[in-house]
Image (tube, grey):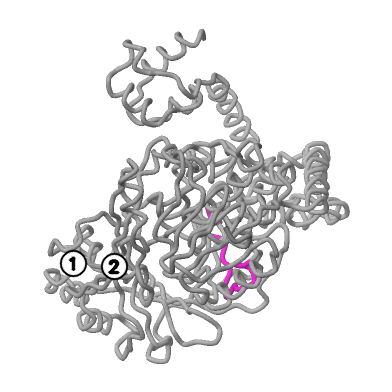
Amino acid sequence: MKTQNKYDVIVVGAGHAGCEAANIAATLGSKVLLVTMNMETIAKMSCNPAIGGVAKGQIVREIDSLGGLTGIVADHSTMQFRMLNTSKGPAMWSPRTQNDRTLFSLKWRQLLEENHNIDFVQDSVNQMIIENNQVVGVLSTMGNKYYAQSVVLTSGTFMNGIIHIGRDQTKGGRMGDRASYGITEQLVSLGFENGRMKTGTPPRVDGRSINYDILEEQKGDTNPTCFSFRQPNVVQDQHSCHITYTNPEVHDILRENLDESPLYNGTIKSIGPRYCPSIEDKINRFSERDRHQIFVEPEGWNTVETYINGFSSSLPQDVQYEALRKIKGFEQAKIFRPGYAIEYDFFFPTQLKLSLETKGIENLYFAGQINGTTGYEEAACQGLIAGINAHQKNNNNEPLILKRDEAYIGVLIDDLVNKGTTEPYRMFTSRAEYRILLRQDNADMRLMPFAHQLGTISDETYDALLAKKNNVEVLTKKISKVTVTPKETNPVLIKYNTAEIPQNYLLDKILSRPQIKSKHLLEIPSVKEWISEFSLEEIEQAEIGVKYKGYIKKEKENVEKLSRLEHIKIPEDFNFNELISLSTESRDKLTQIKPTSIGQASRISGVSPADISVLLVHFGR
């Protein structure tokens, strides 16, 4: 065996999951091999050139807080920053960036190459090397064997991938890249259950052929922020996006050609993403609508290539052309690359432990679309957790398993493992029952203590967090004790359309009013004198704490009640078939999932409250 072929962790695939997995394991001290089919497409944004969005933005900030790089890379390549849902409560605020596709990929490669614990090889893996039900390495299509204590498989859409444009089919994992073969067949022979999923992408258009003058302009935030707490890099110059709409004429063209769509003529039998449907799916499912929104998004600072968000399609290219040119502003549109659909293999995530290690093969981890998810952010956070836990297990340490009240990442993994998925899983704020606790603004407060304990963030970063936390506490206490006078306060209250005060008032009572924001406090002279000592970020955190104090308290109480079930552990080798009082479905599901606690068992589909009562009685509670 060649010494250079022996590693601690091998990561297969250099998409968003693979890059996070390789970097974090190497940061922790593991010697890592990153295997990719193409060194030129590391962290390629295969679909839209954007990071974040509703719930996804929260995930990116969580990745950053745990020591990951997606947020840092996104900030470096930002063309536009927007905080979504600011008209709603803070649990819904979600950062999103429009990114330069090329810069994003180049920055990721640069940061990975700067990590000297990572080796790279351009090759394709077609088989796992398994001994005694444990993975010990991989075999490549070029005949090379690479050995490691753990393997993280992040295959994206490449396993047995088929690209569809109309009735034409091409084998590939992405337009221009070949598919991967062999792994699915091997894992199925070992007892793993797999399925097929479908996703798609819209056409890319020559921006020079778009009439932007008649489109709606969508500018970035006036005062943009960024994703990363650790290395903040705020965009200085922003590129506008634009909005247009489909119309009945467009819909008629699409309907007339549905028999050419692989989605409707039976060619594609797999399930696509429910919340990101193709344009032909939209006009069919929402036939009562006479228009659908189209976002016109730039692909980079130095290219005219433009992403047509909302017009994902697998229809023939000539049909895409005909329909596209009936959209306002696209009358002379030229297509660089047509939209297409892609089918690929995935493995049902109920076959995983909460650490993302497979139950069937020891030291083998799955992350990303192989687990049935969709989205860069969902993939990246899984890669991060898989990379951490591969390193942890290699060094006989406990895995990092985040709870549902600690992170959206915890919600995502818990959903996948306990509920599974038969369609591409996308994160939403509605999936999190504790979303007032899981805000984008406090991701560092929630997760940096875990990162510091692991060793994925520096002491300086952690010290800065502690200082920030202390400042927020001091500020919150001061706001609850300081009083303001009617003379200096009423002009501000009148300005923002809320009732005047007849006497001295506690400042927290003023701030609790929905019309009053923390920035408005700067207009009260006596308050401005001392509140200016704190950062805008600290002031915002204190404001949320004051305004939503009751909601936060209630959610914490709910967490405390339910967490008691998490402390009741179930032995790993427990035989659920011995409990005849359990329903047949419950016994089957519990045997398949093998929950490690009563709390986890309670979240498995098919396990009823009555079944949980049986378990509680059996375990003496």
Please state if 157 lies on the left or on the right of 35 as rendered: left
User: Does the rendering let one see residue 70?
Assistant: no
What's under tag 2, amino acid-wise? Ala
For label 2, the SS is strand
In the rendered image of this protein, does residue 435 appear above or below residue 614?
below
In the rendered image of this protein, does residue 105 appear above or below residue 269?
below
Q: Which mark is residue 262?
A: 1
Marks 2 and 1, how far apart at CA: 8 Å
Q: Position of residue 223 (x, y in %)?
A: 66, 68
Q: Which residue is mark 2?
A: 341
Please state the extent of the stretch shown in magenta in the rendering.
Answer: 73-88
Q: Residues within 10 Å of mark 2 (few under 14, many from 20)?
A: many
Q: Do residues under tags 2 and 1 come within 8 Å of each other at their CB atoms? A: yes
User: Which image quarter: residue 406?
Assistant: top right
What's under tag 1, amino acid-wise? Pro
Q: Position of residue 535 (x, y in %)?
A: 79, 56
Task: Tell which of 473 and 403 is nearer to you.
Answer: 403
Please state if 144 lies on the left or on the right of 233 as rendered: left
